[in-house]
Amino acid sequence: MPAFFHHLSEVLYQVLECVGVNPWVVKRRRHTFLHREAAWDIRFHHDNMTHFHFGSQSEGTTTQGLQSDTDMLCTHNKVNIMYSWADWQKGKENYLMVREEDTPPQHYLLQWIRSDIPQPATHTDDPDYKTGSHGRVFFSNMAFVRAAAGVWGDEHIRHGPSNSGSEDRDYVDAFHCNTLPPAIMSWFTRMQHGFWPSQETLQAARMCPCFLVPDGYHGSPTEQIEWRITPNLIERLLMFSLSIVPLKCLVVLKMLKKQEFAKYIHHDNCKFTSFLCKTALFFTLHRTQPTVWTKPRLIECIISCLQTILEFLNQGECPHFIVEGVDLFDGKLCRECQLRLEQTIQGMIQDDMHVMFHLQFDDLGQRLMTLPHEVRPYPSDDVNAGICGKLAKDMFKQNLKLVQRVCSRLCNNEEADVYTGLNNEIYILESITISPSTTQFDKNYINFLMKSLKSVKASVTSSNCIQYGQPLPPDIWQLYGESLNTDVASSKLKLASMHYCQGELMRAASVLNEVEFDLDDSVQPVCGCGRFLPNEKLSKAFCEYTIQNYCHDKLAKKLSFCVKILREEKLCAPQFLWCEMYRAVGDDVYHRNCWDRDWMDWAEVDARPFLLYLQYLTYRSLGVRHRQLEAFLGLKDIVTSADKLDQLYHHETVINLFGHCCELEGDIRRALHAYDTSLRVLPRNNAANFHKQRLELMLNHHIL
């Protein structure tokens, strides 16, 4: 190796630290995605599903520049996958793993077995099943595709076994295998000789299940009934066992793959994937002494991985690291593209890896050339703070989406009212908490979900009391108290709104003053409505706070959730907001995506403008004109500032609230202009349609 490789390795190591590939951020990424897994599992506990995050985001092998997507595998535990007849279970949906002579490597067929007796099912008219040879009935891998298309509609995206509604997320439905098949079991024997993985890691890997995913072999005559076996959990365990140097090495390989390798793959059906980079890393680790994987030899490690890829390209075959008999190039990379890549990688190595100085992801090449010779011991770059801030916000956004799904399910339950459903849900969550199998990640999310549901329960209870003219029950204040710290603002704003609707104006003003004090510039808004903010900005103060504080409860103190008000809570909200709960005009309901359908029958508004709106109403009723005017001007400042409006999730609702304030100020022309502006933002599913029609009708009849 050239003499300068030692210094280049030191500099590259530090540059990667600065862009988020360091032990501290890697640990934070893994912590975040394990928490998200727990949130999904609690959300779907009724459906008996388990969720796993895989890939770059959860492993910590990505950067902001790489823009890696998020991969989730969802296992359906109600289904029993049989490897032999001894695995049959009465009363369950049973499928027997079957291989025929011409079944491709890594694939199985799932023969449908009756649930009442251990005998094969013989016929069905269900399109999710196909009749194969010898009259056997097989479960089609297209079943999940059809189900996903029904959920996402025109937004449905399919990549291999994954289905989703956006390009940055992949959801893979899967079945859990009770037994590791021989193609995977043989791996443990093959790994006995080599430098990696360790015996401890191998022992832990034996406890990991594998999965069947709906992905047939390309071009196979039975492609639609084939299921691919995948050892994702073993692979994740291997990744989690690595030190930081191999992780940095993999990140650089991904950058080279995206920027350099892609230039020489000209066929539409060909691609060199990140999984191939990971496979090369695994094989290189297996045959390389651990003493090589150190900071001063980072460039050498990268070259070793490239040489492993060269071996694969030269022989025209890339073996799977775990599953025996699989060629990862088959159907992914044609021979012509393989030869092009072989020449490209040879040129990189012969050129002493000068390609590193041209890498554009995260300005890596530029950073390599400008980093001082005195390599700093720890990153001082703000990138790390930005990563931590984004991880924290995304984790709570996911939490809120799942809370939203729970509330939507309770609202649409025809067998029980929302109040009864809330009680049942809280009871189930309490029972899960005390279960010995419940992890700390589970407990964190359960605690968050329970507080969120108690906030809804308190508001529903109060609304019922207001409706029937009953006094609030004494225990209502304990319920409000247990839910007030879900975040900085949302639950407190619902309490203030309830006080306002009860005519308790001084109490409302007191709570609003408390929220105003806490809602400083370091607080970050977040919402689970599924809307994307194209110009989203994370405050520097918030990001710096998340570096030192990643405890779930501490993070909540610097977040403000959008306020959601169910129809069952409407008497605890100002009447103007009731229109938000009935915003559909004509066929508007058919113009909602899968997330919109969860919340558009409620009122939902960003916390800061809702604070100002409540302050305006409260101080107007109290006759404190200067505070009323302050709130009005604050709301006006938001709706007239593109930068501030861009940081909000519910533009149309915020503008509608401002329009109502204009009405109360007697400025009907400005109110109409506000509603017109709101409709330009969102023409459909917007309550501004009602407000505009109402004002125009009043003007036409000269009522004003």
Image (cartoon, rainbow, N blue to C red):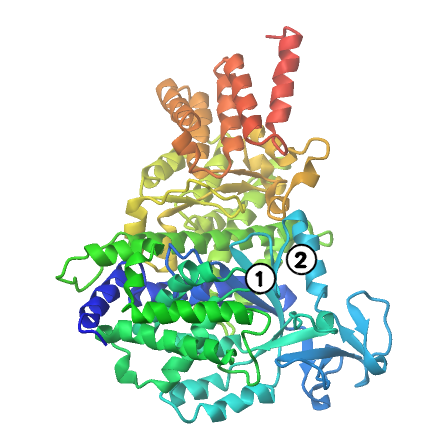
Q: Position of residue 404 (x, y in %)?
A: 56, 50
Quadrant assignment for the C terminus: top right
Give the vertical position of 388 relative to 618 (above or below). below
Give left or right: position of 365 versus 531.
left
The label shown at residue 171 is 1
Tell which circle, 1 or 2, labels the residue nearer the N-terminal end. 2
The residue singled out by tag 2 in the image is: 148
Residue at 21% across, 56% down: 369
Q: Residues within 10 Å of mark 1 (few under 14, many from 20)?
A: many
Residue at 52% across, 59% down: 266
The reply to whether callout 1 and callout 2 are in contact (CB within 8 Å) is: yes
Q: Is residue 464 visible?
A: no
Q: Quadrant of residue 30?
A: bottom left
The label shown at residue 154 is none
Outermost residue, top side: 702
Q: Is residue 315 visible?
A: yes
